[in-house]
Image (tube, grey):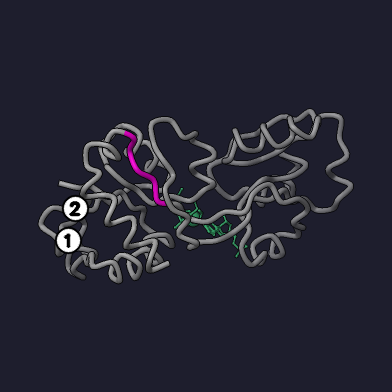
Amino acid sequence: MLTIALSKGRILEQTLPLLEKSGLTIAKEELNSRKLILDTNLADVQVIIIRATDVPVFVQHGAADMGIAGKDILLEHGANNLFEVLDLGIAKCKLMVAAESKDKLKQNTLKVATKYVNSAKLYFQNKGQSCEIIKLFGAMELAPKVGLAHCIVDLVDTGNTLKANGLIALECIEQISSRLVVNAASFKTKNTQIKPWVQNIERIL
Ligand code: PRT
Ligand code: MG
């Protein structure tokens, strides 16, 4: 059995058409059910639906042979025991530093609100900017407004969310898209099953 880990939301929506083109389909009834393990049209392939942040965890431990996750999540999590084999070019956005104005970044110790703690820390460290990271799980845009932080590090797509909250995207940390990752052991032991599948997706892209 080959297990593929996917996350609900925009990545799943953009992945399904790709999987379908590669010959892997999941019935509507399965997708609309509350099941977390979904059967596919292929008897030896199952799909598990989990939180985006949990995808690398499942793949790293071999609980899933493959997974699809945003580069933002992979950078934050680290790449232990898994290989990034394909850039799927979907769910694109940028990991950015945003603040009310450029001046707000001029601080001895910059207070940064983000859920991307490791990526933010590394970015400011490399710039030689001392910072204090404030970990949030959502509504990062609120932090500068209420004086919790000088700036935020978050994903930006259209920029509408920042604009609606009086923030400006100032610095780009990383270009983000979704990647196909494979567990290191599965890559060897299930190579005959995984390789053609990866090549097929690559051809479609
Ligand atoms: O479970 P969890 O809450 O952690 O994940 P989620 O529910 O946010 O998942 P989902 O479906 O949103 O997908 C998350 C993944 O999609 C991320 O890991 C990225 O790889 C990718 N992605 C691409 C994005 C965006 N674009 C994006 N714009 N994820 C989130 N956003 C958010 C951003 O955080 C901000 O709040 O959209 C807002 C900004 O959008 P604009 O268009 O207003 O700039
Ligand atoms: Mg979201």
Residue at (35% x, 43% y) in the render: 182
Residue located beneath label 1 in the image: 40
Q: Secondary structure at mark 2?
A: strand
Vertical placement of residue 56 versus 14, above or below: above
| Residue nearest the viewer, comparing 65 with 197 | 197
Q: Secondary structure at mark 1?
A: loop
Q: Amino acid at mark 1?
A: Thr
Residue 46, disc: 2
Q: Are marks 1 and 2 in contact (CB under 8 Å)?
A: yes
Residue at (31% x, 32% y) in the render: 61
* Rendered location of residue 83, percent (x, y): 41, 40
Left or right of 64 on screen, residue 7: right
| Residue nearest the viewer, comparing 34 with 46 | 46
The secondary structure that dominates the magenta segment is strand
Q: Quadrant of residue 43?
A: bottom left
Q: Which residues are magenta?
A: 180-184
